[in-house]
Amino acid sequence: MSNALVSKQNDCRSCYKCIRNCPTKSISFQNGQASLIAEECVLCGKCYLVCPQECKIIRDDVPAVQAIISSNSEAIASLAPSFLSAFPGVSFATMKKALLQLGFADVEETAIGATIVKKQYDQLCHDPKRDVIISTCCHSVNLLIEKHYPEASQYLADVLSPMLAHGKDIKARHPNAKVIFLGPCISKKNEIEMYPGYVDGVLTFLELERWMQEKSVVLEKETNPAVIEKSLARLFPTEGGILETMAKDNPELTYLEVAGMEECIAAIQDILAGKVHHAFIEMSSCQGSCVNGPAINPAARSIVSSYLAIHHAAGKKDFDVRDYSYGELQKRMPGFALKKKEHSEEEILGVLHSIGKSTKKDELNCSSCGYPTCRDKAIAVLDGKANLEMCLPFLMERAKSFSNNIVESTLNPILVCDENFVIQLANPALQELVGVKNAKDLVGKNVASLFDCTLYSLALGGTPIKSKKIYLPDYERYLYATIVYDERFHIIIAVYRDVTNEEKQQQKDREMVKATAKITSEVIEKNMRAVQEIASLLGESTAETKLALTKLQSTLNKEDKDE
Ligand code: SF4
Ligand code: SF4
Ligand code: SF4
């Protein structure tokens, strides 16, 4: 089956936001496209939430669930209590009515499974062999530990999650049933594949909402639905909610909650560093826990309101559930630690050098590439996940040095001024033009102190000047001027082409033509007179010679005038 979360190609705009937000850096960026690395991804959904281009897509399992419903008369929905967050103001009874309309045979609360699980947690807390216990309700946290911190796997409570426990419980009561979990989580799609046999399908609340809309199933809101007394485990999807349902009756243990991937990673690192002992830790990948899961309509998302709604809906007592033995609920985690590639210091320094980080000071650690440090980025390049061009400061430096080289070495005078004609930049060719040795002597001065600003005013007013021939009498220079106004950066850029030498040569040529024309004219005049005299002796046959000489004379005169 395809990954529960995939990257749509072609729409990526290289902002690296997904990489920046991915807690495990499980995204590779190649050929201008970001793609999930399934083996490393823990399906926390952060990249899905932050991508401004909506490039990440949750696998659509609605058709598969519809197929299960049509081929099975006993498809039972296990509805996560966080529905109160995804569908504010809607009671369990209303949800059940809607789900029955979609074809489910029955609907139960996943909180039943949560009750079974929390009883196991309470028992584990009395196991003297356990020091630190980490709850295992959040599949993304489980994946995080198993894939990225396998040394911490020993601390995971080896108990089925509420979803799996509920699936097991439903199937024990209804042997032919197919169980479909409905919740706010993407990673649950992966969990049922890793632990087959308990639950047959998973739909996120987003998929459910879309399905209901397609079938015109409307959820009626209730202002004050009755609270079922035995529904304490509805608190599970809130931060600290698991702990609130537990007995917490081992005084040797500290019970605490950690929510949010970064916080979980920090806690795991502390545990591995031996800083934490005698603790039961409720860990959730999402800040605020499952009520803030990734697959909830953003319009409904609110940690505080959801927390209040869940606390309002939860009763004070446990659901009535069957007692399970430890063995019946034991979760056997497959263990699939990632093999991390090792890179030598020399290789890492080689990558750093190629992105202009030759000294420690060059390592800005700005994170614009998506990685927390330049070193992490260099390792990602060696891992084949990132490329050199992802370093924005490096690209900017390179572009700056490229344009600086052009500006500094060109023979064309270049001047940049602000909208008040105050000079910001004058290149060496312009300094030479106006007879100044240092750019510092020009920067800050007004263009008017050098020459007439009329063309600059025109450019500022929206009339770009393109290759206009001008003469600067103070400098005795002929130039072609191109002057444009950059509205975005509020600057006027003038680029000149000095044509003084060509102009002087042309003047010389013109004078030469003029002198030649004068001599020729005099010769013709003389010849004309001779012709007239001969004509009187020879008659009309000389008329053509006369006509040719007259034409030559007028051409030379015309050329003279044109010049
Ligand atoms: S968040 Fe990631 S996938 Fe989305 S546009 Fe930015 S780089 Fe591309
Ligand atoms: S789902 Fe989470 S772990 Fe996976 S790529 Fe996205 S942000 Fe990273
Ligand atoms: S300086 Fe470059 S490599 Fe370093 S963190 Fe910033 S973008 Fe990444």
Image (cartoon, helix red, strand yellow):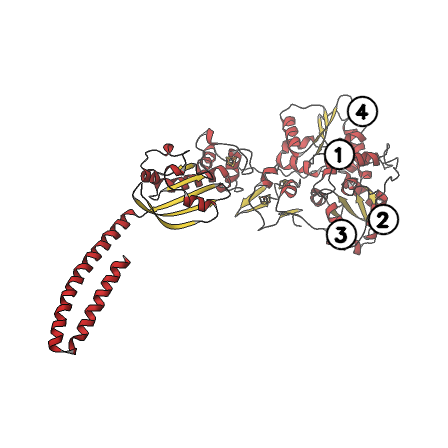
- Image side of residue 496 versus residue 518, left or right: right
The residue beneath circle 1 is 304
Q: Specify the amino acid type for callout 4.
A: Asp
Contact (Cβ within 8 Å) of mark 3 with mark 4:
no
Q: Rate crowding at label 3 as few (under 14), some (14 to 19) or many (20 or more) other CA atoms within 10 Å.
A: some
The residue beneath circle 4 is 249
Mark 1, ligand 2, within 8 Å: the answer is no
Earlier in the chain: of badge 3 and badge 4, it is: 3
The residue beneath circle 2 is 97
Which secondary structure lies at badge 2?
helix
Earlier in the chain: of badge 3 and badge 2, it is: 2
Q: Specify the amino acid type for callout 3.
A: Trp
Nearest to viewer (mark 2 / mark 4): 2
Write down which quadrant ligand 1 falls in.
Answer: top right
Question: Is residue 333 visible to the viewer in this orientation of the structure?
Answer: yes
Residue nearest the observer in this picture, 530 or 424: 530
Q: Quadrant of the C terminus?
A: bottom left
Q: Rate crowding at label 1 as few (under 14), some (14 to 19) or many (20 or more) other CA atoms within 10 Å.
A: some
